[in-house]
């Protein structure tokens, strides 16, 4: 089964090729999830339940503290597989909230999520 790569953020220091980033309609994203599996690199245990509920799929990564790498061509490489696209769930915080440096944001500070699609050219 095809799997899509999903996480809570993508490290900018790993962008070595041209990319496009665009918001994705949540209904379309959920529909896509029904036909493919998810390979997650979610990095924050405190928000994983909230985000999983939002998309209707389990975002538990296959390992603790997952690490994304790059293949020889500069594409994301994770858990033995190369990807040409990745989906990021970006938290929509409650009004007037800004996390402190290094702060783990609690789920009650998140009012929703925006799905962003990163596509490598």
Image (cartoon, grey):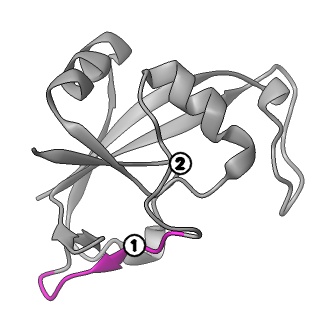
Decide if residue 67 is on the left or right side of residue 117. right
State which quadrant residue 117 falls in.
top left
Distance (Cα) linking label 2 and label 1: 12 Å
Q: Give x and y (percent) for residue 24.
A: 31, 25
Decide if residue 81 is on the left or right side of residue 53. left
The stretch in magenta equals 66-73
Which residue is under mark 2? 8
Q: What secondary structure predominates along the stretch shown in magenta? A: loop
Determine if the magenta segment contains residue 95: no
The answer to whether the residue labelled 2 contacts the one labelled 1, judged by CB atoms less than 8 Å apart, is no
Where 84 falls versus 57 (above or below)? below
What residue do we see at 49% from left, 27% from top?
114
User: Which element is circle 2 on?
Assistant: loop
Judge the density around disc 1: few (<14), some (14-19), many (≥20) Cα neighbours within 10 Å.
few
Q: Earlier in the sequence, mark 2 or mark 1?
A: 2
State which quadrant residue 106 falls in.
top right
In the foreground, 12 or 86: 86
What residue do we see at 87% from left, 26% from top?
96
Which residue is under mark 1? 68
What residue do we see at 30% from left, 70% from top?
78
State which quadrant residue 27 falls in.
top left
In the foreground, 32 or 63: 63
What residue do we see at 38% from left, 36% from top?
116
- For residue 15, the mark is none
Where 95 falls versus 119 (above or below)? above
Q: Give x and y (percent) for residue 64.
A: 57, 68
Where 64 falls versus 19 (above or below)? below
Judge the density around disc 2: few (<14), some (14-19), many (≥20) Cα neighbours within 10 Å.
many
Name of the residue lying farthest toward the top: 27
User: Which element is circle 1 on?
Assistant: loop
Q: Quadrant of the C terminus?
A: bottom left
Q: Give x and y (percent) for residue 53.
A: 55, 22
């Amino acid at each position: 089964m095809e799997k899509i790569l999903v996480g809570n953020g993508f490290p900018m220091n790993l962008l070595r090729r041209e990319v496009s980033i665009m918001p994705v309609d949540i209904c379309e994203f959920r529909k896509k999830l029904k036909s493919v599996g998810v390979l997650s690199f979610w990095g924050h245990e405190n928000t994983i339940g909230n985000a999983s509920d939002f998309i209707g799929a389990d975002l538990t990564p296959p390992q603790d503290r997952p690490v994304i790498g790059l293949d020889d061509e500069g594409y994301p490489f994770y858990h033995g597989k190369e990807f040409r696209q990745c989906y990021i769930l970006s938290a929509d915080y409650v009004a007037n909230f800004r996390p402190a440096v290094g702060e783990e944001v609690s789920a009650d500070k998140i009012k929703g999520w925006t799905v962003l699609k990163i596509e490598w050219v």
